[in-house]
Image: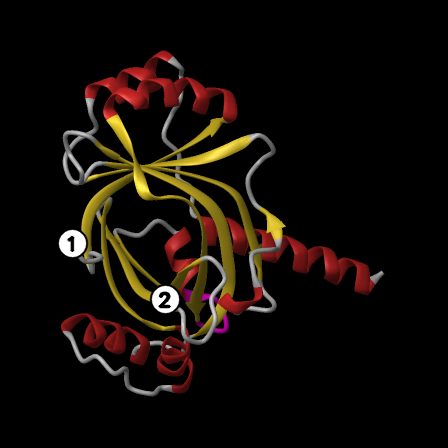
């Protein structure tokens, strides 16, 4: 089966400790299977306007919002396959459109306005979005991910992300995963992704362990960190 190019699902996020993860993992062994890719390092470049219009709008929690990013699995080179993704969220449901190509072609398309080799409904959607905004690489986010899918429902997925790093310089998938930490020490980000509802065994675990869903945007938190860093640097300069 090829890599999916469209997604429509609900994504719920939780911040959990490594101790809670260990307890949950024991339960997951009954209901979940590890993804075939196992553990991986994911790198994303988010595109935005010069004044960060997209993320500022997103952080206002509107009914509808969009983000554009390019994703690689591990450090890329110009010939590596990457995924250009348009992520939309409407009333809590995530809709994702993505197309694969080489890193070089993705860079030429998004930053040099060179038409992609593929002409599909998805590339036309992304073209329309980029032509409606003046976009540039805004931030690079990287993290280690471990993914699982349901034994009875392969569309049900759970991912654990840690070592979430951001940087707003050296924004290239070819330069490796490094930057400033986002997560509190000792915590992981769990994402539960389902087209249908959450299974009872998982809801029961969250209830028994007093774990509540959270609103957590990696890019949103990176943007907040950028602003804080800028304010500190301005204060030092003024002093």
Mark with earlier residue (2, 1): 1
Vertical order, 11 against 222 (above or below)? above
Q: Nearer the viewer, mark 2 or mark 1?
A: 1
Q: CA distance from mark 2 to mark 1?
A: 18 Å
Vertical order, 26 against 223 (above or below)? above
Disc 2, SS: strand
Measured as percent of width and height from the top left, residue 141 is found at 50, 56
Residue at the (31%, 52%) spot, across then down: 62
Please identify the quarter of the rendering in which residue 160 is found.
top left
Q: How many other residues sit within 10 Å of disc 1, few (<14), some (14-19) or many (≥20)? A: few
Horizontally, is 190 left or right of 4 in the view? right
Horizontally, is 137 left or right of 116 in the view? right
- Residue denoted by label 1: 1
Measured as percent of width and height from the top left, residue 208 is found at 35, 12
Q: Residue placed farthest to the right in the image?
A: 239
Residue at the (50%, 73%) spot, across then down: 50
52 drawn magenta: yes
Disc 1, SS: loop
Measured as percent of width and height from the top left, residue 26 is found at 37, 18
- Residue denoted by label 2: 82
175 drawn magenta: no
Vertical order, 14 against 6 (above or below)? above
Q: How many other residues sit within 10 Å of disc 2, few (<14), some (14-19) or many (≥20)? A: many
Count of numbered circles on the image: 2
**Main SS of the magenta segment?**
loop
Please identify the quarter of the rendering in which residue 85 is found.
bottom left
Q: Quadrant of the C terminus?
A: bottom right
Vertical order, 203 against 181 (above or below)? above
Residue at the (59%, 52%) spot, across then down: 225
Q: Which stretch appears magenta?
A: 49-53
């Amino acid at each position: 089966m090829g890599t999916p190019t469209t997604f429509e699902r609900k994504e719920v996020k939780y911040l959990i400790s490594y101790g809670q993860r260990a307890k949950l993992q024991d339960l997951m062994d009954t209901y979940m299977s590890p993804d075939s890719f196992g553990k991986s390092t994911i790198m994303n470049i988010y595109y935005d306007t010069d004044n960060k219009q997209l993320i500022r709008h997103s952080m206002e929690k509107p009914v509808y919002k969009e983000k554009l990013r390019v994703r690689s699995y591990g450090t890329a080179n110009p010939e590596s396959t990457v995924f250009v993704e348009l992520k939309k969220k409407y009333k809590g449901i995530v809709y994702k459109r993505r197309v694969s190509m080489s890193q070089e072609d993705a860079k030429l398309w998004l930053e040099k306005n060179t038409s992609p080799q593929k002409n599909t409904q998805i590339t036309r959607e992304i073209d329309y979005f980029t032509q409606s905004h003046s976009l540039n690489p805004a931030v690079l986010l990287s993290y280690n991910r471990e993914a699982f899918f349901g034994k009875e429902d392969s569309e049900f997925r759970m991912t654990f992300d840690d070592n979430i790093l951001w940087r707003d310089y050296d924004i290239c998938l070819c330069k490796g995963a490094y930057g400033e930490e986002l997560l509190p020490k000792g915590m992981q980000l769990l994402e539960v992704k389902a087209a249908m509802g959450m299974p009872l065994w998982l809801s029961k675990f969250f209830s028994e362990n007093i774990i509540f869903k959270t609103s957590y945007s990696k890019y949103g938190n990176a943007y907040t960190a950028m602003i804080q860093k800028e304010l500190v640097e301005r204060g030092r300069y003024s002093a």
